[in-house]
Image: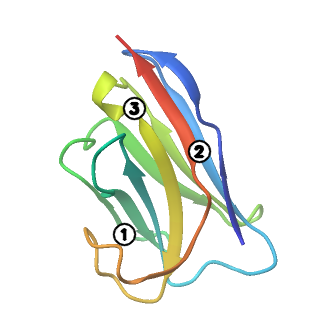
Amino acid sequence: QLQASGGGLVQAGGSLRLSCAASGRTFDLYVTWFRQAPGKEREFVSGITRGGSSASYADAVKGRFTISRDYARDTVYLQMNNLKPEGTAVYYCATGRRRTWPSGDGMDYWGKGTLVTVSS
């Protein structure tokens, strides 16, 4: 299972760090973060290879978000800086064997999500 945590309420311009921990299984080749805002479709945020050698970001978060892996803790992080109100969403981590982002079709396992609320 994947468990996302670290969400909360933050003011615009603030920071949060989300964590995605794998329990009972290891991450597959790719690990991603997606988000879904109220009334909107799920969208790709960031992805990283299992080896951590390659990371990708949606244009909307590029330069503000950083994805990383802690192999010892088997955890993937999403550091989110300079958050904007449009970043309010439930953030999900997912892992899979195929790189299909921005589509999530290649992700086989999804966590339950953590809510991030950015106030203006």
Query: Mark 3 — residue?
Result: 88
Q: Quadrant of residue 6?
A: top right
Secondary structure of the residue carrying tag 3 is: loop
Query: Mark 2 — residue?
Result: 114
Query: Mark 1 — residue?
Result: 54
Q: Earlier in the sequence, mark 3 or mark 1?
A: 1
Q: What kind of residue is marked 3?
A: Thr
The residue depicted at 57 percent of the width and 52 percent of the height is: 113
Quote the CA–CA distance across marks 1 and 2: 24 Å
Secondary structure of the residue carrying tag 1 is: loop
Mark identifier at residue 68: none
Q: Are marks 3 and 1 in contact (CB under 8 Å)?
A: no
Residue at the front extreme, as displayed: 39
Q: What kind of residue is marked 2?
A: Thr
105 or 71: nearer the viewer? 105
Quote the CA–CA distance across marks 3 and 2: 11 Å
